[in-house]
Amino acid sequence: METNHILIVEDDYELRHLFQRVLVQNGYRVRGVEDGKAALEALEKEYADLIISDIMMPVMDGLSVLRKLRSKNISTPVLLLTAKDS
């Protein structure tokens, strides 16, 4: 059985590595990147079964990544996260 590949897009280094560590311990292949631009570059090179992305990031935010993917008819599931309370 092939392991699902998850792309983590999070500008907070500690949080990104926490997500990666937990997911790897649970049997997933994981790649972490620091912003939306890096996410799009990573997706050009390697397929992801799921993208977990922060919404608020420098360079390119999570919503912009989602819009860009959908404009290219890429339907990979995207889970958007935020620490913002409103």
Image: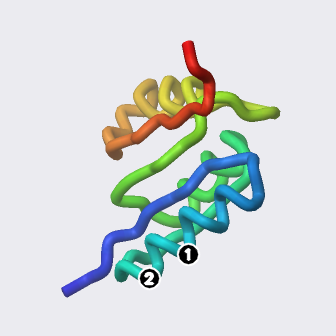
* Res 20 quadrant in image: bottom right
Q: Secondary structure at mark 2?
A: helix
- Res 55 → quadrant: top right
Give the alpha-carbon distance from disc 1 to disc 2, as whole Å: 6 Å
Residue farthest bottom in this picture: 1
Question: What scheme was used to colour the molecule?
Answer: rainbow
Which residue is pictured at 80% across the width and 33% down the height? Answer: 58
Q: Is residue 77 above or below residue 82?
A: below
Query: Which residue appears at 71% of the width and 50% of the height?
Result: 38
Please give the label number shown on residue 21.
1
Name the residue furthest right.
Answer: 59
Q: At which x and y percent is residue 42? A: 62, 58
In the rendered view, tell whether residue 68 sits above or below residue 31: above
Front-most of 13 and 32? Answer: 13
For label 2, the residue is: 25
The quadrant of the rendering that contains the C terminus is top right
Q: Position of residue 21 (x, y in %)?
A: 55, 75
Residue 14, percent from left and from top: 73, 61
The answer to whether the residues at label 1 and label 2 have Cβ atoms under 8 Å apart is yes
Considering the numbered disc 1 on the image, is that residue within a helix, a strand or a loop? Answer: helix
